[in-house]
Image (cartoon, rainbow, N blue to C red):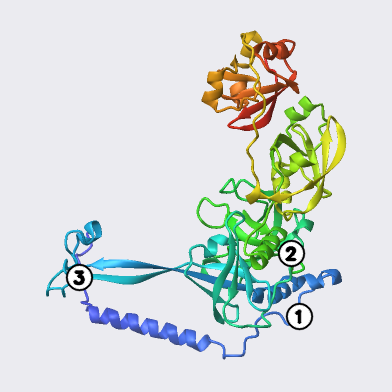
């Protein structure tokens, strides 16, 4: 049986009705929520019982150690704001910047400009930088970096307590990136950094960097001394002996303080290694012992005086040790050449000597020797411990100043070079040599006293090329035996076998150096 059809009834609902219902529901919800809220102050946050965690008694001082350190050291570090002032010329004539006044933008006859004529205006443009500095005396001497203040026309100094002063540059040394500035006005009782001893540092020691990175004043970061004696940054002629640290150093930190766990100033922050321009975990500081010597020279003498020995030096690598018959434990610096009439020559130092100590301090590489000599004032007599023919010897050298040194070698007697062929021995190394003829002497600008053979060809794929020998080099000795002809050259190489060490004394562009390597197959 079919169900009867029932027509459905639809109740019209207006939009207003829907909004009204929604509003009532929302109101009732809010009212309910409000009715459940606790009264202010009725909820007790946090546990009433202190956690049962106690700091061991011997670590109690560690809890505030760095805060105490920062409280003492931060006031000694200032913002250094250098300003460079340039005069910039503006004109409403677009051609002025290309042609200047040569086409009459200025009135030829000095008469007043006509109305509507091109106007030229000189304006002062000020460009500011930002760095840091460390107060080293109560009367306002401040130690910072050369690159922070170089080229500055004005220098403003801001202390951690927001005082502002104008400062002058007392002196600067670009070779070590050190500068000294001084507050112009009369001041006294400024907070002063306690200067430590960077020679006592060891990798792993605590290090705290304080400065003004990205204009953030009085910023403190913590790390350790990652390494010592870092070199090879930037200018090869500069004096480098950097402390490496992982305490965060960023742009604006330059010239700031690196201090140890006792708050002693151990370095002046100077640069970072970065691919992005920001901190990547590797920062460098100038050791305070180096910076202090330069600072005192600049303040008292107005210039930096560095000791000069008068030698060419090179690293003592494994091949060179074997060629000299030295043990692997021997460390020092090989003397490749001694300049005539210079301090080393006068003291009896000879080519082939190995310097192991300067003034009682060991030297392990060329940079250490260079820096130790440079740190000694000219005129001082210092002991130099050397190895000569396997025996230790002490020489006393009176250093001169580098600016007074004459590094040219004097001429000797004329000697003819014998002719001949280099033979198979030299070809094994990948070189061909020639006797030192008058024509070659003139071409290479060689003194008549120079005796040896000239490298004429170097196979690019040979061992000689890999070891750095080049065309135009003059080979003076082989295994400490003088070579005056191609015949002697071939004889010296004739009996060498694969695995044997060979030591060449080479002259290049007026300087001599040793080149040691093993004969390969």
Q: CA distance from mark 1 to mark 2?
A: 38 Å
What residue did someone put label 1 on? Answer: 49
Q: In terms of depth relative to the viewer, which is nearer, 10 or 187?
A: 187
| Distance in Å between CA atoms under marks 3 and 1 | 79 Å
Q: Position of residue 292 (x, y in %)?
A: 70, 63
Quick one: label 1, few (<14), some, or many (20+) residues within 10 Å? few
Residue 250 in sight in this render: no
Q: Earlier in the sequence, mark 2 or mark 3?
A: 3
Label 2 element class: loop
Q: Earlier in the sequence, mark 1 or mark 2?
A: 1
Tell us which disc is closer to us: 3 or 1: 3
Disc 3 element: loop
**From the viewer's perspective, is residue 341 above or below residue 100?**
above
Q: Position of residue 250 (x, y in %)?
A: 56, 61
- As drawn, the label of residue 119 is 3
Residue at the spot of label 2 = 260
Q: Is residue 292 above or below residue 13?
A: above
């Amino acid at each position: 049986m079919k169900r009867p059809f029932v027509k459905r009834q639809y109740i019209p609902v207006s939009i207003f009705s829907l909004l009204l219902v929604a509003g009532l529901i929302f109101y009732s919800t809010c009212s309910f929520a409000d009715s459940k809220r606790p009264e202010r102050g009725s909820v007790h946050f946090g546990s009433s019982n202190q956690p049962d965690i106690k700091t061991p008694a011997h670590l109690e001082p560690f809890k505030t150690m760095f805060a105490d350190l920062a409280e003492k050291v931060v006031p000694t570090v200032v913002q250094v704001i250098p300003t460079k002032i340039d005069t910039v010329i503006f004109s409403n004539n677009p051609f002025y910047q290309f042609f200047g006044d040569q086409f009459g933008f200025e009135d030829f006859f000095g008469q007043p400009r006509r109305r509507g004529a091109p106007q030229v205006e000189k304006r002062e443009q000020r460009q500011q930088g930002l760095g840091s500095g460390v107060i080293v005396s109560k009367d306002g001497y401040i130690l910072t970096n050369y690159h922070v203040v170089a080229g500055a026309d004005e220098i403003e100094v801001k202390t951690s307590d927001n005082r502002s002063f104008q400062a002058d540059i007392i002196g600067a040394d670009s070779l070590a990136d050190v500068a000294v500035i001084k507050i112009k006005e009369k001041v006294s009782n400024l907070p002063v950094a306690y200067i430590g001893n960077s020679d006592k540092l060891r990798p792993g020691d605590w290090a705290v960097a304080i400065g003004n990175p990205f204009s953030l004043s009085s910023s403190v970061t913590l790390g350790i001394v990652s390494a010592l004696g870092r070199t090879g940054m930037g200018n090869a002629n500069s004096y480098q002996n950097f402390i490496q640290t992982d305490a965060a150093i960023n742009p604006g930190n330059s010239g700031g303080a690196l201090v140890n766990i006792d708050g002693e100033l151990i370095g002046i922050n100077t640069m970072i290694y970065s691919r992005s321009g920001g901190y990547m975990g590797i920062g460098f500081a100038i050791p305070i012992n180096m910076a202090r010597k330069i600072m005192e020279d600049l303040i008292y003498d107005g210039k930096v005086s560095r000791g000069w020995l008068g030698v060419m030096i090179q690293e003592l690598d494994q091949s060179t040790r074997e060629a000299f018959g030295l043990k692997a434990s021997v460390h020092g610096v090989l003397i490749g050449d001694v300049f005539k009439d210079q301090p080393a020559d006068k003291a009896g130092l000879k080519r082939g000597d190995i310097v192991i100590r300067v003034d009682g301090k060991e030297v392990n590489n060329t940079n250490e020797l260079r820096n130790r000599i440079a740190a000694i004032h000219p005129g001082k007599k210092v002991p130099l411990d050397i190895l000569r023919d396997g025996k230790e010897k002490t020489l006393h050298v009176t250093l001169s100043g580098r600016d007074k040194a004459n590094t040219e070698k004097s001429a000797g007697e004329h000697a003819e070079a014998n002719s001949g062929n280099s033979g198979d021995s030299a070809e094994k190394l990948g070189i061909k040599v020639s006797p030192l003829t008058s024509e070659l002497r003139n071409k290479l600008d060689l003194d008549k006293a120079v005796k040896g053979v000239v490298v004429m060809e170097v196979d690019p794929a040979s061992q000689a090329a890999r070891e750095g020998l080049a065309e135009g080099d003059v080979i003076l000795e082989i295994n400490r035996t003088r070579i005056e002809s191609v015949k002697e050259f071939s004889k010296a190489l004739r009996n060498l076998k694969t695995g044997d060490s060979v030591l060449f004394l080479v002259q290049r562009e007026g300087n001599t150096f040793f080149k040691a390597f093993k004969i390969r197959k």
